[in-house]
Amino acid sequence: MSIEINHPHIISPIYELVKVLEFDIDLGDDRFPLRLEIFRSLADNCLFRARIWRTEFFRIQSTFPQEENSQPSHDPSDELILLDFSDYLTKDYENFRANSLESAIALIIKDLQQFLDKTNNLEAK
């Protein structure tokens, strides 16, 4: 399928989410799920984009609506938030090429494994 949007403010190809993977990481004193999202360009089957997220709970408090005493009307709540984890990888996966979806996933997993190996070596010292 090829969809095009011709507009000067759209500066990238259109990507479709083709795969979501989630797995748990254990870094000793820190355990958390990672979510890997893989997107493929609709115009080029070998052009990909990836997002990797750490999930974490945050206690948040809405500001509005407020009571007459200027205090929030709602209680705080614990919400699951996605945090960008891509800074821990060595490559930029905003736009990258791979021969297949499986090859794209393998590139990112290899990069993540290198981070985990490096982290494990630092903790062992």
Image (spheres, helix red, strand yellow):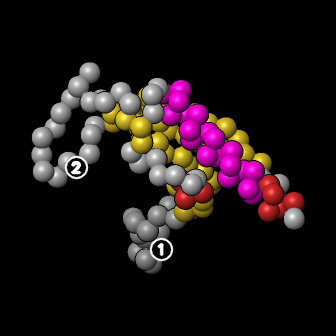
- In the rendered structure, find residue 107 and report the number of the disc placed on it: none
Task: Specify whether 88 is left or right of 73.
Answer: right
Q: Pinpoint residue 77: horizontal percent, then vertical percent.
A: 58, 57
Task: Quarter of the image for the C terminus: give it.
Answer: bottom right
Could you say whether the residue bearing mark 1 is in a helix, strand or loop? loop
Q: Considering depth in this image, is 67 or 49 the residue closer to the camera? A: 49
What amino acid is labelled 2 in the image?
A: Ile
Task: Quarter of the image for the N terminus: give it.
Answer: top left
The span picked out in magenta is: 101-119
- In the rendered structure, find residue 71 and report the number of the disc placed on it: 1
Circle nearer the N terminus (2, 1): 2
Q: Is residue 105 visible?
A: yes
The residue indicated by pointer 2 is 11
Q: Is residue 41 magenta?
A: no
State the image quarter where residue 33 is shown. top right
How many numbered discs sit on the rendered protein?
2
Residue ranking furthest to the bottom? 69
Depth-wise, is mark 2 or mark 1 nearer the camera? 2
State the image quarter where residue 70 is shown. bottom left
State the image quarter where residue 41 is shown. top left
Q: Residue at x 53, y 26 (%)?
A: 102
Residue ranking furthest to the top? 1
Q: Residues within 10 Å of mark 1 (few under 14, many from 20)?
A: few
By secondary structure, the bulk of the magenta-drawn segment is best described as helix
Q: Residue at x 79, y 62 (%)?
A: 122
What amino acid is labelled 1 in the image?
A: Gln
